[in-house]
Image (spheres, coloured by chain):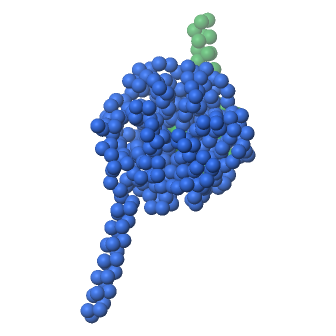
């Protein structure tokens, strides 16, 4: 019984994690912390955004968006523009990417 | 034929004279012996702002959303601010209180030096007393605040209670003329009340009198946003601080150095170079100067604080 509950818990938690979506944005001009924090501030206002990771050197941002929420490219582009930058690329990542 | 040779020679002579004048004016020699590296320390995730009291160094550990405090030898003393801070930026100390510019919350948080939150001021927006990315703050002897309102492209001058007095720069408009701003990052007040502005992406320092009048500016030729690595030039000014003798220290972010100037903008010395070793920087963000002249610098990419001392 214990094993069954443990297995169910694993499956459920796995599904929850898998349900969140990841997006990768390429952003031109990222450099100083003032700029990066400004971008992160705008992106954090987008619906469903749970986590933001920025790679300044690559000019890339990874967003973790919660289950059931879809991030569209126009929304992302507008948020990036509001922070004073331009969106270079937009990609929804598959699990494991 | 002889006439045209003379014309060409005159032309090249003129060029040589102009280049020489340019070189002499905008490539000044150091007026002081400079600084020597003493030590480095810290466990940070994006150390940004820095301020010093009589005995301690305060560092905004930005991605850890807190302030870390050390003694002058780098021994950790305490940390605070985790509950309320978002992205703490440049810092200032005035009358035993620490002023923290919080970029994410668009507020200035004010703490006692032992870390107790006393009050906060500001809110998000572009109106008077509203901020869009607070980057730095300074306080004059009347308790009035000067706020580097980064994305609003202005410096706001506020009474101690937050009431708006005036601003420099046009809200949301980048400008290059005297008094206009291009993403200002920090401010500092000299003993005579004059205001020094790190006009970040204009690659210059601007100075205003205690009455608010523009006095002068410097940073490359005519301080007109011409970026460079020569003495007195900048590649993004990310903070400004006043030393005990009234001299001006500025972090020259992409040039990986700190520059020191007389109050009138005369270049005095510079220290630092790119790297990860002792005395090297990976994008220094902020500088603070103790009463004895010791200089402390946040070294962003190397996630540490560096301590420097003037050469004898």
From this view, report whether residue B141 is shown above or below residue B202: above
The quarter of the picture where the N terminus of chain B appears is bottom left
Give the residue at the far bottom of this rendering.
B1
| x, y percent for residue B87 | 58, 33
Q: Residue at x 46, y 55 (%)?
A: B219
Among the chains, which one is blue?
B
| x, y percent for residue B228 | 41, 56
Displayed quadrant of residue A41 = top right
The quarter of the picture where the C terminus of chain B appears is top left
Toward the viewer: B211 or A4? B211
Toward the viewer: A1 or B102? B102
Toward the viewer: A97 or B237? B237
| x, y percent for residue A57 | 45, 44
Displayed quadrant of residue B19 = bottom left
Query: Does the rendering let one see residue B107?
Result: yes
Q: Residue at x 50, y 19 (%)?
A: B78
| x, y percent for residue B231 | 37, 53
From this view, report whether residue B244 is shown above or below residue B114: below
Query: Does the rendering let one see residue B80?
Result: no
What is the number of callouts on the image? 0
Q: Residue at x 63, y 49 (%)?
A: B211
Give the residue at the far left of this rendering.
B2
Q: Residue at x 61, y 53 (%)?
A: B213
Toward the viewer: B312 or A71? B312
Among the chains, which one is green?
A
- From the viewer's perspective, is B257 left or right of B134? left
From this view, report whether residue A72 is shown above or below residue B4: above
From this view, report whether residue A65 is shown above or below residue B234: above
């Amino acid at each position: 019984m214990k094993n069954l509950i443990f297995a169910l818990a694993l499956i459920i938690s796995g599904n929850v994690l898998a349900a969140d979506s990841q997006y990768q944005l390429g952003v031109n001009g990222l450099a100083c912390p003032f700029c990066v924090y400004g971008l992160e501030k705008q992106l954090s206002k987008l619906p469903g955004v749970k986590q933001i990771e920025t790679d300044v050197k690559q000019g890339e941002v990874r967003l973790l968006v919660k289950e059931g929420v879809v991030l569209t490219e126009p929304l992302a582009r507008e948020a990036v523009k509001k922070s004073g930058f331009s969106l270079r690329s937009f990609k929804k990542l598959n699990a494991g990417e | 034929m002889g006439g045209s040779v003379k014309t060409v020679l005159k032309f090249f002579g003129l060029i040589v004279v102009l280049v020489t004048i340019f070189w002499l004016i905008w490539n000044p020699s150091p007026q002081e012996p400079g600084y020597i590296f003493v030590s480095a320390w810290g466990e940070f995730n994006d150390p940004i702002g820095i301020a010093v009291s009589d005995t301690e160094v305060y560092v905004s550990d930005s991605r850890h959303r807190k302030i870390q405090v050390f003694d002058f030898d780098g021994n950790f003393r305490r940390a605070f601010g985790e509950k309320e801070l978002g992205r703490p930026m440049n810092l200032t100390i005035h009358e035993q209180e620490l002023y923290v510019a919080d970029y994410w919350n668009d507020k200035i948080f004010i703490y006692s030096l032992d870390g107790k939150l006393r009050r906060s001021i500001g809110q998000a927006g572009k109106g008077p007393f509203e901020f869009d990315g607070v980057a730095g703050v300074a306080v004059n002897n009347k308790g009035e605040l000067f706020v580097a309102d980064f994305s609003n492209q202005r410096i706001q001058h506020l009474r101690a209670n937050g009431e708006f007095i005036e601003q420099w720069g046009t809200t949301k408009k980048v400008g290059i003329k005297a008094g206009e701003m291009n993403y200002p990052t920090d401010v500092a007040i000299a003993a005579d009340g004059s205001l020094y502005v790190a006009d970040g992406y204009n690659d210059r320092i601007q100075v205003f009198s205690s009455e608010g009048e523009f006095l002068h500016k410097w940073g490359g030729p005519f301080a007109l946003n011409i970026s460079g690595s020569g003495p007195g030039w900048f590649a993004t000014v990310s903070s400004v601080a006043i030393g005990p003798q009234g001299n001006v220290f500025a972090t020259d972010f992409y040039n990986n150095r700190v520059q020191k100037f007389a109050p009138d903008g005369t270049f005095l010395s510079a220290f630092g170079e790119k790297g990860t070793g002792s005395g090297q920087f990976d994008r220094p963000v902020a500088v603070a100067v103790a009463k004895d002249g010791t200089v402390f610098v946040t070294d962003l990419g190397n996630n540490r604080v560096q301590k420097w001392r003037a050469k004898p």
